[in-house]
Image: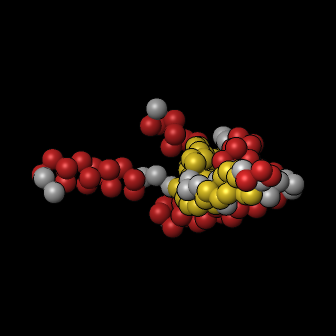
């Protein structure tokens, strides 16, 4: 690795230490269904978001709830504070398309229909409100 790439890689690592996030890869639901749940909690206070996810009827909300709890635990580990004492917010959440399983379903007259089983990657960022204001 060249010196320039090494320096930028180290800068990226240092910048990542101040971010508090959790990532879930290859969730076997379509990105469109997961984005509906993600839009529901974007920018919300963490306790309200957990309540909204808990009582949501969507299947994707169970996975996002677990991921959000993981992001909160990551924040507690990195800062050394308790989440009960601070007001945490879901600062950013995004859903990317993941791997796609491609299958063929037989049809009449010798045809075959394509079946695309989609998956996604979800990333949740949490932080306190005052930290975000000082950075902007």
How is the protein colored in the picture? secondary structure
**Quarter residue 74 falls in:** bottom right
Which quadrant is the N terminus positioned in?
Answer: bottom left
- Horizontal relation, residue 27 to residue 109: left or right: left
In the rendered view, tell whether residue 130 sits above or below residue 88.
Answer: above
**Is 92 located above or below residue 27 in the figure?**
above
Percent x, y for residue 32?
70, 44
Task: Write the residue at 72% across / 50% down.
Answer: 111
Question: For the point 19% across and 54% down, which residue is it?
Answer: 6
Tell which residue pokes out farthest to the left in this image: 3
Query: Can residue 78 be seen in the rendering of this structure?
Result: yes
**Residue 110: where, in percent of width, then height?**
73, 53
Q: In this image, 128 relative to 108: left or right?
A: left
Look at 71% across and 61% down and name the residue there. Answer: 63
Quick one: 114 or 20, which is closer to the camera? Answer: 114
Tell me if residue 81 can be seen.
no
Residue 113 in percent (x, y) is at 71, 50
Farthest top residue in view: 136
Towards the viewer: 33 or 53: 33
Number of marks in the rendered image: 0
Q: Position of residue 64 (x, y in %)?
A: 69, 57
Camera-side residue of 124 and 87: 124
Q: Is residue 59 above or below residue 5?
A: below
Please name whichever residue, 77 or 117, is drawn nearer the observer in this view of the structure.
Answer: 117
Q: Residue at x 46, y 52 (%)?
A: 19
């Amino acid at each position: 690795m060249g010196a320039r790439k090494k320096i930028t890689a180290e800068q990226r690592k240092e910048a990542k230490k101040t971010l508090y996030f959790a990532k879930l890869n290859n969730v076997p639901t379509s990105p469109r269904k997961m984005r509906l749940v993600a839009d529901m909690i974007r920018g919300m206070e963490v306790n309200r978001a957990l309540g909204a996810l808990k009582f949501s009827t969507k299947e994707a909300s169970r996975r996002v709830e677990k991921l959000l709890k993981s992001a909160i635990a990551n924040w507690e580990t990195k800062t050394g504070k308790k989440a009960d004492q601070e007001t945490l917010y879901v600062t950013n959440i995004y859903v990317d398309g993941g791997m796609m399983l491609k299958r063929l379903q037989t049809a009449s007259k010798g045809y075959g229909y394509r079946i695309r089983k989609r998956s996604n990657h979800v990333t949740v960022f949490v932080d306190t409100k005052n930290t975000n204001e000082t950075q902007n």
